[in-house]
Amino acid sequence: MTLAERYRAALAPVVPMETSIEIARGEGSYLAATDGRRYLDLVMGIAVNALGYGHPAVIRAVTEQVSRHMHVYSGSGYQESVVAFAEALTAEVGADSLVFFGNSGAEAVEAAIKAARFATKRPAIIAFRGSFHGRTLGALSLTASAARYRSAYEPLLPSVYHLDYPAPTRLDMTPDEAFQHVRQQMDQLLTLEVEPEQVACVVVEGIQGEGGYVVPPAGFVPWLRKLTRDHGMLLVMDEVQTGLGRTGRMWSYQHEHIEPDLITLGKALGGGLPLGALIGRGEVLDAWTGGLHGSTFGGNPVSCAAGLATLTVIRDEGLVERAQVLGEAALARLEELAALPEIREVRGRGLMLAVEFQGQDAAAHVERVLRRGLERGLYLHPAGVRHEVIRLMPPLNIGESALLDAIGVVADVIQETAHVRS
Ligand SMILES: Cc1ncc(COP(=O)(O)O)c(C=O)c1O
């Protein structure tokens, strides 16, 4: 039996298979298949492998920790790799912050919901349409990037309210209009549906990820910061996809010069191993005691060792600044695509880059580009609420020419596939 046949026989079909690649190994920025083909991987486990595959510092840290112990429950005893990583993270977030480790982005969001409700003693949560916060039932209650993710699992958490995210192309507005529109929606929500004193937190992505790499208008996040502070709500920045330097700042909220109350992390956090975290201001998390939350594997020492090695390389090699500079060069190259009639917009921040297609055929065209890209040795991923966007999530240490060449291939492939019928 082929691997595909064995998958069909043994695995639940709920996760759709995007390619027919039989994966042999990862090598830096490339994925090698068992048939000998190599693909430049601009997906990276969905924005997970910030240093690509097989970075020696990460492998060294993992091997060293594995040889000591692979798992001890986080409440069983004191572990060096766990506290060392927490210290490194708090140094990046702010001196008085505290860390709770879970296993994934969704778990980090679950922890944020529970911590915010506990700290404020309020029930309600405000989130945004087009957002993706995970698929566990609490996190899913905030996710609103596709009705099909939610519909089969209703009822979800009550007291969750959604507003539009100020996504200009989705709303067909200018950035200023989109921002104004969301302010009006917030006014209406807090007047007509839920009193501000009932709202525990506002949960928001600094750049919408799954929603299409949407960079909000300047001022949106600072406005949320002020509004939440004025009403005693907590501001939760979901940095699961944006965190650890991808946007050209360590955390995306640093572009807006604000300090959130809580931050959720996942994806790149574990250096390729499963890990999630909630980081919060001491005064919010200090009283969260006595087993009110926890997880068997959360803060696994091997994941923490891999995460610390990854963060150390990112910091020591200046990869955050590099993401900013390389991102600007990549965006300038992508701008050449903006003139094509099929393209609605190119956008991004740092190494979170996107091409949005327009028209009836947008999603089908994206699908053709992904397929043809693979034939040309390029692995790409869609995004956007209708899958009308291609997102590029290269490792932060990708070679400049590899990335710029890849964008050239994307340009070719878009034109080649413009008028082909699926
Ligand atoms: C912004 C954001 N939050 C949360 C999640 C959920 O993370 P996980 O898939 O690790 O549960 C994701 C995953 O794509 C994400 O992009």
Image: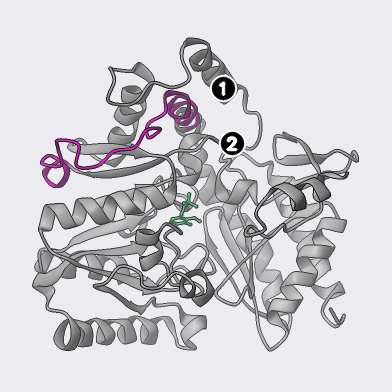
Tell me what residue is drawn at x 67 percent, y 88 percent: 359
Disc 1 + disc 2, Cβ < 8 Å: yes
Q: Residues within 10 Å of mark 2 (few under 14, many from 20)?
A: many
The correct choice, above or below, for 64 with respect to 14 in the image is above
Instruction: Residue lying at the far top in this picture: please name it.
Output: 68
Q: What is the three-letter code of the residue carrying label 2?
A: Leu
Q: Please state, as top left, top right, bottom left or bottom right, where the C terminus lies in the image.
A: bottom right
Q: Please state the extent of the stretch shown in magenta in the rendering.
A: 282-310
Report whether 169 appears left or right of 1.
left
Report whether 387 appears left or right of 169.
right
Instruction: Residue lying at the far front in this picture: please name it.
Output: 9
- Residue 197 percent location from the top left of the image: 9, 71
Measured in 3D between alpha carbons, the distance from the residue under mark 1 to the one under mark 2, in whole angstroms, is 10 Å
Tell me what residue is drawn at x 14 percent, y 35 percent: 290
Q: Nearer the viewer, residue 209 or 257?
A: 209
Sequence-earlier tag: 1 or 2: 2
Q: Nearer the viewer, residue 24 or 279?
A: 24
Asked where in the image residue 178 lies, by quadrant, the reply is bottom left
**Can you identify the residue that label 1 sits on?**
57
Q: What is the three-letter code of the residue carrying label 1?
A: Ala
Q: Can see residue 261?
A: no
**Can you identify the residue that label 2 sits on?**
51
The correct choice, above or below, for 97 with respect to 145 in the image is above
- Residue 3 percent location from the top left of the image: 82, 44
- Residue 358 percent location from the top left of the image: 66, 83
Magenta stretch: includes residue 204: no
Tell me what residue is drawn at x 45 percent, y 64 percent: 132
Disc ID at residue 259: none
Q: Nearer the viewer, residue 181 or 32?
A: 32
Q: Nearer the viewer, residue 108 or 174?
A: 108
